[in-house]
Amino acid sequence: MNITNKKDILDTLFSRLPEEPLPKQFRSNLMEQIQAEAIRIQKRKERYGLAAIIVASLSMIGLAVIILYKFFTPASIDSSIFHISFHLDLPKVTFPSLSDYSFAAYIGILSLVLLAFDYYLRRLFKKHTQKSSPNEL
């Protein structure tokens, strides 16, 4: 049996069916079903989002507890989770040298120059677009 023969058979069968008008509430029922499906999909997305937030929050809290337990317990206690001993060495606080200040000033001045250049280019672009299209905003 050919595909065209199957199509012809279906065409003849569908042409024999009597045409009946749709029920009066067909459109409203269909729209209600579509809205119900959209609400169901939205609720499912919200549940997945909430589950992801809960998992991320619990993992961050667990990681914080592990880090606090590992780094801030006395070294004499040997009841560690992974049986690995960590020691927290606090960094020494020093003030930057004059060369560090000059580098920071260089970066600050460079960023101000680039910001001014950006402002100038945006102003030129705005003037150019207003001249080419005076009716648009």
Image (spheres, rainbow, N blue to C red):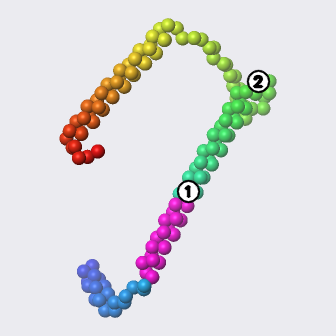
Residue 1 appears in the picture as rendered: no
SS class, disc 1: helix
Comparing 109 with 135, the one in front is: 135
- Give the residue displayed 26% in from the left and 46% down from the top: 136
As drawn, the label of residue 137 is: none
- Quadrant in which the C terminus is drawn: top left
Q: Residues within 10 Å of mark 2 (few under 14, many from 20)?
A: few
- Please name the amino acid that badge 2 sits on: Ala
Tell me where residue 117 appears, x and y as whole percent: 32, 25
- Give the residue displayed 48% in from the left and 73% down from the top: 32
**Residue lying at the far top of the rendered structure:** 98
Q: Which residue is mark 1?
A: 46
Residue 77 appears in the picture as rendered: yes
Q: Which residue is mark 2?
A: 75
Classify residue 129 as left or right of residue 46. Answer: left
Q: Quadrant of residue 47?
A: bottom right
Classify residue 37 as left or right of residue 86. Answer: left
Q: Main secondary structure of the magenta part?
A: helix
| Residues tagged 2 and 1 counted as in contact (Cβ below 8 A) | no
- 34, above or below 49, in the image: below
Q: CA distance from mark 2 to mark 1?
A: 45 Å
Question: Magenta residues?
Answer: 25-44
Q: Quadrant of residue 86?
A: top right
- Give the residue displayed 65% in from the left and 44% down from the top: 58
Q: Residues within 10 Å of mark 1 (few under 14, many from 20)?
A: few
- Give the residue displayed 36% in from the left and 25% down from the top: 115
- 124, above or below 89, in the image: below
Tell me where residue 13 appears, x and y as whole percent: 31, 89
Comparing 2 with 64, the one in front is: 64
Labels 2 and 1: the sequence-earlier one: 1
| Membership of 93 in magenta stretch | no
